[in-house]
Amino acid sequence: MEPAMHPANKVARDHVAWRALLVLAVAAAVGLAACACNDRATPPPPASAAEAAFSVQGMTCASCAVAVRAAAKGVPGVYDARADAEQGSAWASYDAQRTTVQAIARAISDAGYPATAQ
């Protein structure tokens, strides 16, 4: 026969169990959400797809490259962008019916990194 558990200890044990269950439920939900994002099909590029390369000044680190990429991707019609701080270059894939090379270069320049199309 087990000794009787003090009521305060029983409440504490139950609280820990509920907390562990909550943590597992949240972790499972986050994991499922991450899987759902990765399983989405990337839409094919439009028929008017084009690519452009840019010479970018002032990129000195990875954070700069992230800012340049974000500026390019912020242009409506740009569906992918990359930037390389070491090379001072950026590339964008875009819908030529929705935007222009000049608009992308202007967005990168407005973010503080003077850009010109190559």
Image: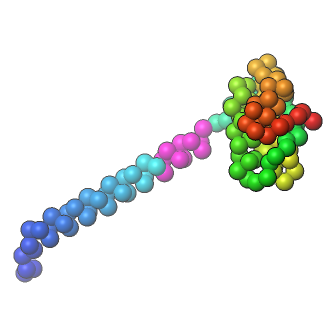
Residue at point 67% right, 35% down?
42
Image quarter where the C terminus lies is: top right
- Residue 14: x and y in percent read 20, 63
- Residue 116: x and y in percent read 88, 34
Q: Is residue 44 in sight in this rendering?
A: no
Residue at point 84% right, 26% down?
102
Residue 39: in magenta span: yes
Residue 13: in magenta span: no
Per the rendered image, the range of residues in magenta is: 31-40
Against 96, residue 8 (above or below) is: below
Q: What colour scheme was applied to this rendering of the protein? A: rainbow
Residue at point 48% right, 51% down?
31
- Residue 108: x and y in percent read 77, 35
Against 19, residue 70 (above or below) is: above
Q: Is residue 14 in sight in this rendering?
A: yes
Image check: 87 left or right of 45? right
Closer to the camera in the image, 103 or 19: 103
Residue at point 37% right, 57% down?
24
Image quarter where the N terminus lies is: bottom left
* Number of numbered discs on residues: 0
Closer to the camera in the image, 100 or 106: 106
Q: Please, what is the dominant secondary structure of the magenta stretch?
A: helix
Q: Residue furthest top?
A: 97
**Residue 114 appears in which quarter of the rendering?**
top right
- Residue 94: x and y in percent read 78, 29
